[in-house]
């Protein structure tokens, strides 16, 4: 199996795990506040990284040159999770998967050109346009009131997409100085510490009063949706490139739809199925190699 194929398959797994995360997050917003929930997600993420570090058997190193990327990545990850929580709380999990998926690759392309001076092929730009088209179809945008985009949860999704684009670029640059697995581990540790300071006035033990459904969703997000999926994404973004890695996010709405259908018994809508299928084409073109 070639290296590119291996990382492509791993990225598909990460997208499946992320797709299921939106349903889990919707469950969690029903019980606990954003500060406490985000803290516990990072605590679980930190603990779940310990066996991952043991499995890879890489000596844990913290290069000085990586510190600025770790601090920036930690703060950005916290902000992303806050925006995602607020968006899902005031809107729907489906809208989150679609809006963030559409805009993140677009923002990443723009930032990679403006900041990193990256150049892209015509096929990649065509793939980006196709992905946006597929997302618009999935969102069924003609039924959305424009005012709700700026006063409802959709605004938080737009902000989350912009933050995730920055997270992707920071992660890619950090790979020059630190192992991607170590990067993810230190991100969880630093974020956990920062959130502990923020949540001191809150009752963080509230999570222990929740039911099995809550804990299943929380453990899924903390272990599979964050530690496993995020590590795969960071590693793959370094091997495939930030823009190509972000293109796989076009698949998240399709996976989110399937998981919500299975777990939450939500309706399979034809426009989402069609849009998801179109997004598969976008992934192909954005990952298509240049002939040069």
Image (cartoon, helix red, strand yellow):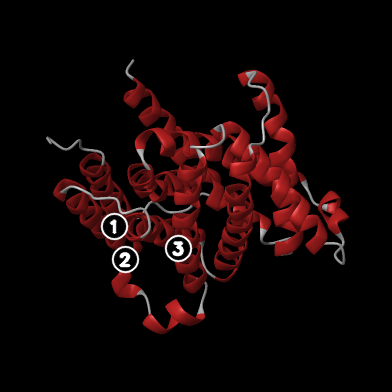
Dot 3: within a 10 Å radius of its alpha carbon, few (fewer than 14), some, or many (20 or more) residues?
many
For label 2, the SS is: loop
Which numbered dot is residue 162? 3
Q: Residue at x 43, y 29 (%)?
A: 10
Dot 2: within a 10 Å radius of its alpha carbon, few (fewer than 14), some, or many (20 or more) residues?
some
Tell me if residue 150 comes above or below residue 45 in the rendering.
Answer: below
Residue 46 visible in this rendered orientation of the protein: yes
Question: Is label 1 or label 3 in front?
Answer: 3
Instruction: Give the quadrant of the C terminus.
Output: top left
Q: Which residue is mark 2?
A: 140
For label 1, the SS is: helix
Find out whether the residues at labels 1 and 3 contact each other: C-beta distance under 8 Å: no
Find out whether the residues at labels 2 and 3 contact each other: C-beta distance under 8 Å: no
Q: Residue at x 75, y 45 (%)?
A: 43
Mark 1 and mark 2 lie on one chain; the one further toward the N terminus is: 2
State the CA–CA distance, disc 1 to disc 3: 25 Å
Mark 1 and mark 3 lie on one chain; the one further toward the N terminus is: 3
Q: Which residue is mark 1?
A: 271
Find out whether the residues at labels 1 and 2 contact each other: C-beta distance under 8 Å: yes
Looking at the image, which residue sits at the far bottom? 147
Looking at the image, which residue sits at the far top? 1
Q: Residue at x 25, y 53 (%)?
A: 128
State the CA–CA distance, disc 1 to disc 2: 7 Å
Tell me if residue 179 comes above or below residue 29 in the rendering.
Answer: above
Q: Nearer the viewer, residue 117 or 191?
A: 117
Q: Nearer the viewer, residue 232 or 95?
A: 232
Which numbered dot is residue 126? none
Question: Is label 2 or label 3 in front?
Answer: 3
Mark 2 and mark 3 lie on one chain; the one further toward the N terminus is: 2
Left or right of 19 on screen, residue 288: left
């Amino acid at each position: 199996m070639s290296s590119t194929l291996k990382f492509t398959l791993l990225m598909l797994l990460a997208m499946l795990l992320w797709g299921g995360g939106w349903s889990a997050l919707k469950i969690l917003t029903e019980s606990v506040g954003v500060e406490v929930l985000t803290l516990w997600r990072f605590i679980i993420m930190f603990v779940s990284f310990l066996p991952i570090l043991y499995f890879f058997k890489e000596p844990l190193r913290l290069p000085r040159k990586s510190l600025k990327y770790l601090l920036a990545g930690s703060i950005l990850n916290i902000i992303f999770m806050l925006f995602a929580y607020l968006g899902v709380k005031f809107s729907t999990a489906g809208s989150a998967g679609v809006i963030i998926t559409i805009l993140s690759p677009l923002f990443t392309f723009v930032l990679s050109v403006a900041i990193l001076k990256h150049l892209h092929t015509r096929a990649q730009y065509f793939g980006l346009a196709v992905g946006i088209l597929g997302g618009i179809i999935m969102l069924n945008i003609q039924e959305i009131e424009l005012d709700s985009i700026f006063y409802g949860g959709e605004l938080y999704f737009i902000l989350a997409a912009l933050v995730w684009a920055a997270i992707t670029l920071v992660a890619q640059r950090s790979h020059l100085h630190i192992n991607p697995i170590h990067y993810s581990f230190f991100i969880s540790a630093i974020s956990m510490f920062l959130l502990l300071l923020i949540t001191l006035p809150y009752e963080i033990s509230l999570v222990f009063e929740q039911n099995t459904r809550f804990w299943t969703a929380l453990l899924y997000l903390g272990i599979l949706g964050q530690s496993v999926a995020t590590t795969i994404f960071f590693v793959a973004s370094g091997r495939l490139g930030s823009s190509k890695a972000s293109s796989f996010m076009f698949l998240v709405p399709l996976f989110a739809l399937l998981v919500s259908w299975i777990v939450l018994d939500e309706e399979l809508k034809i426009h989402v199925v069609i849009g998801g299928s179109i997004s598969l084409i976008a992934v192909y073109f954005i990952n298509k190699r240049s002939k040069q």
